[in-house]
Image (cartoon, rainbow, N blue to C red):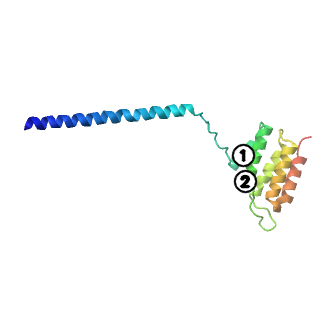
Amino acid sequence: MEITLLLKSIMGLVIVLALLIFLLFLPSNRKKEKTESKEATPIVVAQRPPNTDLEYLRSIIKKKKSTTKELQEALELVIKYHGIVHEKLGLRAHPDFDIYMDILFTICRHPNTNKDIVVKFDRELGRLNPDYKKEINEAITKGLNSRRV
């Protein structure tokens, strides 16, 4: 009786071992198929989203070595993500508008700027903030008057 029990136990262990070996090799074939299909598809490199922090964009605008293209991109991001200024406080401009005045003043004085950049930023900012048109025009006038000619 003990021999038949011993034989049944060995046969059961052999079956379990065969099943485990089968499962061991089964996933490895699937991994190869997945890697082969991945190799066939082109690899797409994801670009980092641009930094849209207002202080970072101001630093690009204030850098004297920024190119015209960098200025234009930074100003487009300012308009896109930070274009709307808080409403006026009665007759006074909101304190956050000082940042935009500084940007306007800096753009007008930047060595790599051109009229297209200044005019486009002026129009977009004025379109988004019609209450501040007077202040925007004053900031541009001060910036253009302060340029070295």
Q: Nearer the viewer, residue 14 or 87?
A: 14
Q: Residue at x 14, y 34 (%)?
A: 7
Q: Is residue 126 visible?
A: yes
Q: Nearer the viewer, residue 52 or 37?
A: 37
Q: What's the amino acid at mark 2?
A: His
Q: Residue 58, percent across and down? A: 73, 46
Q: Earlier in the sequence, mark 2 or mark 1?
A: 1
Q: Residue 122, percent across and down? A: 84, 52
Q: Residue furthest left?
A: 1
Q: Residue at x 76, y 51 (%)?
A: 79
Q: Residue at x 76, y 40 (%)?
A: 70
Q: Residue 107, percent across and down? A: 82, 45
Task: Tell me the distance, in whole angstroms, between the alpha carbons under discs 2 and 1.
Answer: 10 Å
> In the rendered view of the protein, which quadrant contains the N terminus?
top left
Q: Are marks 2 and 1 in contact (CB under 8 Å)?
A: yes
Q: What's the amino acid at mark 1?
A: Leu
- In which quarter of the view is residue 48 placed? top right
Q: Residue furthest right?
A: 149
> In the rendered view of the protein, which quadrant contains the C terminus?
top right
The residue where tag 1 is placed is: 57
In the figure, 87 relative to 67: above or below? below
Q: Residue furthest bottom?
A: 90
Provide the secondary structure element on which disc 2 rests.
Answer: helix
- Residue 6, numbered label: none
Query: Neighbour class for label 1 at 10 Å: few (<14), some, many (≥20)?
Result: many
Q: Is residue 108 visible?
A: no
- Image position of 37 (left or right of 85): left
Provide the secondary structure element on which disc 1 rests.
Answer: helix
The residue where tag 2 is placed is: 82
